[in-house]
């Protein structure tokens, strides 16, 4: 008989505890019961829960603030071989410096807030007279299947997404044509044609006369050249020895 009574008491207690656990904290307080402890490991609707490290907040989805970065521009061939840095010459920006590092051009730029926007690149120790931005210095239409080219050199500062802007008697410049990848440090170029349309833009290099310029189609450009010494190869730019501020 005692065992039966004890079993009934335990069952009743468990039933009361179960019912109490199902109550809201407001209902529990009204009945004189303690509130339930908070439950962890749940995500609010519409939010994904990610693990955190003690003392470190979850990364913010907002874009990173702009940073000013300085360094030299390293030139690499299409197979990734380093050719040298941009040459700092009294006549302007062009060609690769194969000599002492003291002749390397040093540059500075500020990244975009999105990390993908077009930016200006400024020469900070130019051996030449201004302008001191790096960009295009002639106005032509680049396109797939076209052999046209656009000159590379020191340019005036121009607005983002602007077509070539008149700069002097013969020049038509664009400067805000670059994007910077903070992971690889690659600098890519995006030329805007005179009609305002963006064009596929390839950095071309003629090793025979050590010149750099831009084309829309390497194959079409080379096919239009009579002499093999005028043939070019694609190259890439990278920010070397980058310093963030």
Image (cartoon, helix red, strand yellow):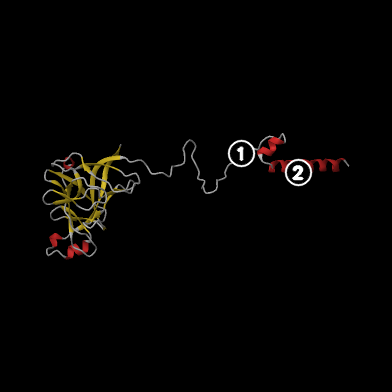
**Quarter of the rendering occupied by the N terminus:** top right
Give the numbered dot on residue 38. 1
Residue 46 horizontal/vertical position (percent): 52, 49
Q: Observer-nearest residue: 158 or 200?
A: 158
- The local secondary structure at tag 1 comes to loop
Tell me: residue 115, above or below residue 30: below
Image quadrant in which you'd find residue 79: bottom left
The reply to whether discs 2 and 1 touch (Cβ–Cβ < 8 Å) is no
Q: Give residue 71's quadrant in the image.
A: top left
The residue depicted at 55 percent of the width and 48 percent of the height is 45
- Looking at marks 2 and 1 on the same chain, the residue that comes earlier in the sequence is marked by 2
Label 2 residue SS: helix
Left or right placement of residue 137 versus residue 183 in this view = left
Residue that appears at 34% across and 44% down: 113
Residue 163 x %, y %: 22, 53
Label 2, residues with CA under 10 Å away: few <14, some 14-19, many ≥20:
few
Residue extending farthest to the right is 1
Q: Position of residue 154 (x, y in %)?
A: 17, 46
**Residue on which the image places disc 2:** 15
Crowding around mark 1 (Cα neighbors within 10 Å: few <14, some 14 to 19, many 20+) is: few
């Amino acid at each position: 008989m005692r065992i039966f009574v004890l079993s009934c008491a335990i069952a009743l207690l468990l039933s009361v505890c179960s019912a109490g656990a199902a109550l809201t904290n407001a209902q529990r307080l009204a009945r004189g019961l303690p509130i339930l402890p908070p439950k962890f490991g749940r995500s609010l609707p519409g939010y994904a829960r990610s693990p955190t490290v003690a003392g470190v907040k979850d990364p913010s989805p907002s874009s990173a603030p702009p940073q000013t970065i300085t360094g030299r521009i390293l030139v690499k061939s299409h197979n990734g071989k380093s050719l040298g840095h941009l040459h700092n010459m009294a006549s302007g920006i062009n060609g690769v410096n194969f000599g002492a590092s003291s002749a390397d051009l040093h540059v500075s730029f500020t990244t975009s807030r999105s990390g993908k926007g077009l930016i200006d690149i400024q020469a900070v120790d130019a051996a030449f007279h201004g302008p001191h931005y790096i960009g295009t210095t002639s106005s032509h239409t680049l396109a797939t299947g076209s052999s046209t080219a656009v000159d590379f050199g020191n340019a005036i500062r121009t607005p983002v997404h602007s077509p070539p802007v008149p700069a002097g008697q013969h020049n038509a410049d664009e400067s805000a044509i670059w994007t910077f990848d903070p992971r690889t440090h690659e600098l890519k170029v995006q030329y805007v044609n005179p009609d305002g349309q963006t064009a596929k833009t390839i950095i071309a290099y003629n090793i025979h006369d050590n010149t750099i310029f831009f084309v829309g189609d390497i194959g079409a450009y080379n096919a239009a050249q009579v002499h093999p010494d005028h043939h070019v190869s694609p190259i890439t730019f990278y920010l070397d020895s980058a310093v963030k501020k």
